[in-house]
Amino acid sequence: MARRPRGRFIDGILLLDKDTGMSSNFALQRVKRIFNAAKAGHTGALDPLATGMLPICLGEATKFSQHLLDADKRYTVTAKLGERTDTSDSDGEVVQTRPVNFSQELLMESLDYFRGETMQVPSMYSALKYQGQPLYKYAREGIEVPRVARPINVFELNFIGLEGDELTLDIHCSKGTYIRTITDDLGEMLGCGAHVIMLRRTQVAEYPYERMVSLEQLNEMVAKAEAEEIEPKTVLDPLLLPMDTAVSKFKEINLSDSVAPYLMNGNPVQVPVIDGLDDGELVRITIGDEHKFVGIGSMNDDGLLAPKRLIVVRDPSSESN
């Protein structure tokens, strides 16, 4: 007999405002426990030093977390100039100290270098793997391993302010961009060195900053609900965004109620031709007049819509409390 998962079946995406000092996995497990969710996953780790938006996918939403991992991000970063560390942030050891003496013109020219499409060599203190092990594990043992430069795109790099030896920037970038590496490289271009002392992720994809909620706020909501003898899920569940927001940029194909069962059983189905749809392009699949989201698929060579990732449609009575 299949083991029944602990927790309840709840689907959706929470925009967690992660606090500094905690790992993304710790934050994930806390959210999972607060919601009493059977399944949960995050969408790309934030460093313990970093704060800000960490989308947590619950239930069937975990099937689409990769698309948020691949999404653009926006950060506010403050760099301390004059000191370079071995991790490029304040969690590391200072390895070099130099005077801060550069012109405003050099700063602006240096910032412009990072805008647009460039190649970036990942930090040794990243979670990327080499021969099955994360790079940071080698770094902690003092081992340097080969790293391949990867293409990144900095869509915006805005100067916010320079107060003393602290430089603050706003960066909108593609997936896989290491802000610590930009900061370290910028410090070298300025001739003084630099490292991150504050990093806040303010946006993932198109998710609104205002919808973020912290662990402290979640705990307060649960405590208040229990004091008022209200089930916590009554106040927690409205915080969740629909799971299809993870794939909101995909074109929609809406199926009739009569055709949908064939696709839900894993079969390709005939659909009307959609202008501007490339072969193999992923689409968002909905059903009926209510446009109920059921998953993603793509058009195959035969002009049929083939399912790729479908959600499990559950009877509400199956929920575990």
Image (cartoon, helix red, strand yellow):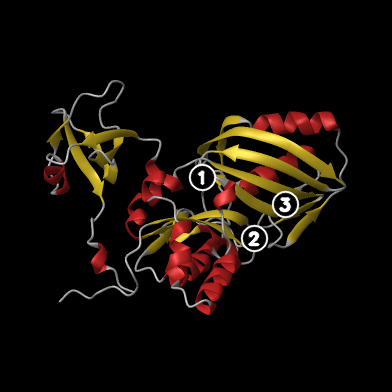
Image mark for residue 49: 2
User: How packed is label 2: few (under 14 Cα within 10 Å), some, or many (20 or more)?
Assistant: some
Specify which label sits upstream in the sequence, 2 or 1. Answer: 2
Q: Is there CB contact under 8 Å for labels 3 and 1?
A: no
Q: Nearer the viewer, mark 3 or mark 1?
A: 1
**Vertical comparison of 7 with 106: above or below:** below
**Which secondary structure, mark 3?**
strand
Specify which label sits upstream in the sequence, 3 or 2. Answer: 2
**Which secondary structure, mark 1?**
loop
Label 1 amino acid? Tyr
Mark 3–mark 1 Cα distance, whole angstroms, equals 28 Å
**Which secondary structure, mark 2?**
loop
**Residue 278 visible in this rendered orientation of the protein:** yes
Q: Nearer the viewer, residue 4 or 73?
A: 4
Q: Is there CB contact under 8 Å for labels 2 and 1?
A: no
For disc 3, the marked residue is 195
Mark 3–mark 2 Cα distance, whole angstroms, equals 12 Å
For disc 1, the marked residue is 207
